Image (cartoon, rainbow, N blue to C red):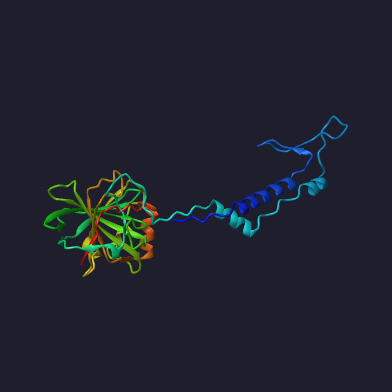
Amino acid sequence: MAVKLLPVSIVLSFLAACSSQQAASSPADVATSPGEEPTAQPAQGGGGSVEPAPAELAKTAAPAAEPSTQERQTLAEAEHVAVSYLLPEASEGRSQSPINIVSSRTVQGKHKVKFHYQSSKEHVDNLGHTVKVTYDAGSSLEYDGKSFDLVQFHFHTPSEHLLDGVTYPMEMHLVHAEHDHPEHLLVVGALFKEGDPNKLLAKLVENVPEHAGEHADKDLDLDASTIFKRGEGYYHYEGSLTTPPYSESVTWLVLDQVHEASAEQIEALNRIEGNNARHIQDQRARLIDHWH
């Protein structure tokens, strides 16, 4: 990214103007040391100190002129270094998440996905950095012939993945563990924008414990399958956890349609967990495939 540099003459002129203003505003007969208050100098021919009269101070200590709008803008531009969120964060890993998904650069995918979700009671944890809902056993997802058990889902505000360079106000992660190899995770990511209230969040946001570290069990049914839309597709890539230890053992399926939640629902979660999105990572040589 190109950074506009100001001509040296402009910056030097501005600094010289500030130095001239400081010299004009300091009385010639007052000596100061860094961090000390000014002290009056002895009068000529006397042995004691003489406090300057208020009228004399008014004459000698004229207030420094405020920098003009142009000067302030010049200084701000000289100190400003532009940083773009679209630039990937430096990372030692080769397959880190999240990433910016550019739809025009994806390839056609042919994966097979089947959801076998059931309802679950509400088991909500306020972890401070996120809101987590532990899901009852019995729900699973079949991906290319392998079975993954739905373990929990949680939220990030704002979204972690970008879609065509756009950051959305919220992202939901449904975390699945492979039935035979639980260390291998499959995470379904759903992006949310402000819109109509979300059915899944209707009661959930009200039942989150008030303090970090608290857990709540509610005798209410929730169904994670309600977030899916008819006919939506998936972006797939191989990546990592977005929280420590950033293990590169995650298959990602990011839904290609943006979902809706009310502004109040999104703000309620953000008040609890704060801004907890990880910066995007370098895609490197990984392919992203897309299928409907």
The vertical placement of 222 against 48, above or below, is: below
Q: In the rendered image, is residue 223 in sight?
A: no
- Quadrant (top left/top right/bottom left/bottom right) for the C terminus: bottom left
Q: Is residue 49 left or right of residue 149?
A: right
The vertical placement of 197 against 122, above or below, is: below
The residue positioned 82% from the left and 47% from the top of the image is 55
Q: Residue furthest top?
A: 47
The vertical placement of 128 against 109, above or below, is: above
Q: Is residue 29 left or right of residue 98?
A: right
Q: Is residue 134 left or right of residue 42?
A: left
Asked where in the image residue 262 lies, by quadrant, the reply is: bottom left
Give residue 290's position: percent from left, percent from top.
23, 63
- Quadrant (top left/top right/bottom left/bottom right) for the N terminus: bottom left
Asked where in the image residue 261 lies, by quadrant, the reply is: bottom left
Give residue 23's position: percent from left, percent from top.
73, 45
The residue positioned 82% from the left and 33% from the top of the image is 42
Q: Is residue 281 left or right of residue 19?
A: left
The residue positioned 55% from the left and 55% from the top of the image is 77
- How many numbered tags mark residues here? 0
Tell which of 76 and 221 is nearer to you: 76
Give residue 268's position: percent from left, percent from top.
37, 58
Q: In the rendered image, is residue 262 in sight?
A: yes
